[in-house]
Image (cartoon, helix red, strand yellow):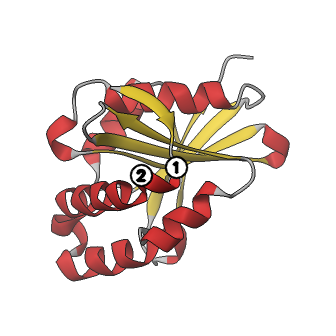
Amino acid sequence: MFVRTAGERDLVAIRALLVETWHATYDAIYGVEKVTEITSEWHSVAALKARLARPSTEFLVADDGKRIGGIAFAEAVDGGEVLVLRQLYVLPDMQGRGIGGMLLDEVIESFPEAHTIRLEVEEKNTRAIAFYQANGFVRAGRVDDHGGTGIPALIYERVLAA
C-alpha cells in the first residue's frame, strides 16, 4: 500500500469503501436503515467531490494499485494549529495491517504547523478507540451531536511534536 492524495477518479471507490466500512462498523450500533441514510448523505460522490476542493484539507487514499484499502480526510482549523481528523477508514478485510497508521502518519505530516490533532469517535466503536489510544490519543471530552446526526461521540486528542 502507498498513500497518495485522492482525486476525482477515486470517488466511486472511496464511496464503496465508506459504505462497506460503515455498514460493517455501525449496523449493529445504529441499524442498517440509519447507516444507509447517513452514508447516502455523507458519502455520496457529490459530497466526496466537494471535499476535494475544500481549503486547508487533505484527502488521502491508501492504494495498492488494484484497490483503495483506506481513506483519511483531515482539516486544519484555528489558524492551522489544530488538525481535525474528520475520517479515517480502512476496509474491514484490510484492518490490522498498518494501513490506518500509514494514513494517520501522512495526515499529520501534511500539516506541519499543527500542534494538536483532534477527532470524534462513536463511543461504542471500541476497535477505533483502541486504535487511537495505541497511537497516542487521549480522551478530551464528549459531544452530543456528532456531525448533525444527534448521535453522541467521544473527543480524542493527541499533542503533536513541536
Q: In the picture provided, is 114 more to the left or to the right than 4? A: right
In the rendering, at what x and y percent does residue 156 appear? 52, 43
The residue at which mark 2 appears reads as 10
In the rendering, at what x and y percent does residue 13 appear? 32, 55
**Three-letter code for the amino acid on which mark 1 is drawn:** Gly
Q: Is residue 106 visible?
A: yes
**Three-letter code for the amino acid on which mark 2 is drawn:** Asp
At x 44%, y 69%, the residue is 45
**CB of mark 2 within 8 Å of CB of mark 1?**
yes
**Is 119 situated above or below 15?**
above
Dividing the picture into quarters, in which one does residue 130 lie? Answer: top left
Whole-angstrom CA distance, mark 2 to mark 1, is 5 Å
**Is 44 situated above or below 80?**
below
Q: Nearer the viewer, residue 152 or 18?
A: 18
Q: Which class describes the residues within 10 Å of circle 1: few (<14), some (14-19), or many (20+)?
A: some
* Outermost right residue: 79
At x 42%, y 52%, the residue is 10
Q: In the picture provided, is 81 more to the left or to the right than 85? A: right
Q: Nearer the viewer, residue 2 or 70?
A: 2
Dot 1: element: loop
For the C terminus, give its image quadrant.
top right
Q: Residue 17: which disc?
A: none
Dividing the picture into quarters, in which one does residue 69 lie? Answer: top left
Dot 2: element: helix
Q: In the picture provided, is 35 more to the left or to the right than 83? A: left
The residue at which mark 1 appears reads as 7
At x 52%, y 70%, the residue is 47
At x 56%, y 33%, the residue is 107
